[in-house]
Image (spheres, grey):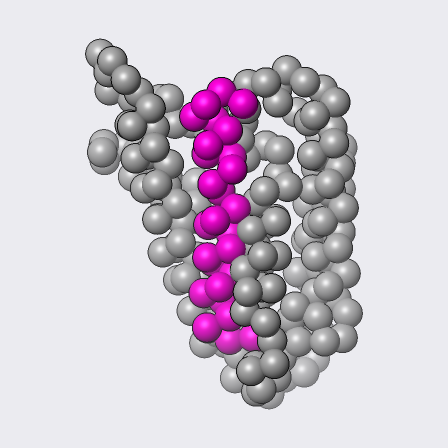
Amino acid sequence: MSFEFLITSMIVILLPGTGVLYTLAIGLGRGFRPSVFAAFGCTIGIVPAAIASIIGLAAILHMSALAFQIIKYLGVAYLFYMAWNILRDGGAMKVSSDVTKISSWRIAINGTLLNVLNPKLSLFFLAFLPQFIPAGTINPTPVLLMLALTFMALTFIVFIGYGACASLARDYVISKPTVMVWLRRTFAGTFGLLGLKLALSER
């Protein structure tokens, strides 16, 4: 495992994307434990993209305009749904001291779908992972699997950190309802913009 791969992966993971935003939103709205499930879901959502890139399906997806468009618009619809879910009362960013009634697995599933319905994720892995295969490797599959698993482990760790930081701010948010309103609008607007950006993208 090269040091360059670890550093590059950390830079990519730390960049704010849908998974980061979702984990932060859950951490602020629900607390630390639900944010761990959000991080777990986002991490599991990487699996299909990693597998697709390793066995070459990502290349097929890239060549098939119809397949790409179908997955893309499913992703767009889901991003818009997440924007609405955050913005509405009782949605993903509802702040309450009682989180026992919230389904942690539902939070995880939502996080999983965010990445599963992102057609660009498999293309990212297809371009990213092969760069770190050592020269002369006869069978690259085990190496690619190890790289993908390492990337997922780093993602989970970093996202837990994001969720922990967000959950630490909950008490302040609870005491400042106006701040929460603007945070919800900001997160919802960001998801909406990400959905619009994906809808307008070609590849």
Residue 94 position within the rendered picture, expressed as x and y whole percent measured from the top left: 66, 76
At x 61% / y 57%, what residue is drawn? 110
Q: Left or right: 108 with respect to 85? A: left
Q: How many marks?
A: 0
At x 74% / y 22%, what residue is drawn? 66
Q: Left or right: 135 with respect to 175? A: left
- Give the quarter of the figure containing the C terminus: top right
Magenta-colored segment: predominant secondary structure:
helix
At x 70% / y 65%, what residue is drawn? 86
Residue 67 versus residue 156 in the image, above or below: above
The quadrant holding residue 70 is top right
Q: Is residue 46 magenta?
A: yes
Residue 144 position within the rendered picture, expressed as x and y whole percent measured from the top left: 34, 28
Say which of 148 and 168 sits in front.
148
Residue 148 versus residue 109 in the image, above or below: above
Q: Left or right: 74 with respect to 11? A: right
- Give the quarter of the figure containing the N terminus: top left
Which stretch appears magenta?
29-57
Taking the image as drawn, is residue 132 in sight?
no
Q: Left or right: 2 with respect to 171? A: left
Q: Is residue 197 magenta?
A: no
At x 62% / y 33%, what residue is drawn? 119
Residue 59 position within the rendered picture, expressed as x and y whole percent measured from the top left: 55, 18
Residue 171 position within the rendered picture, expressed as x and y whole percent measured from the top left: 52, 84
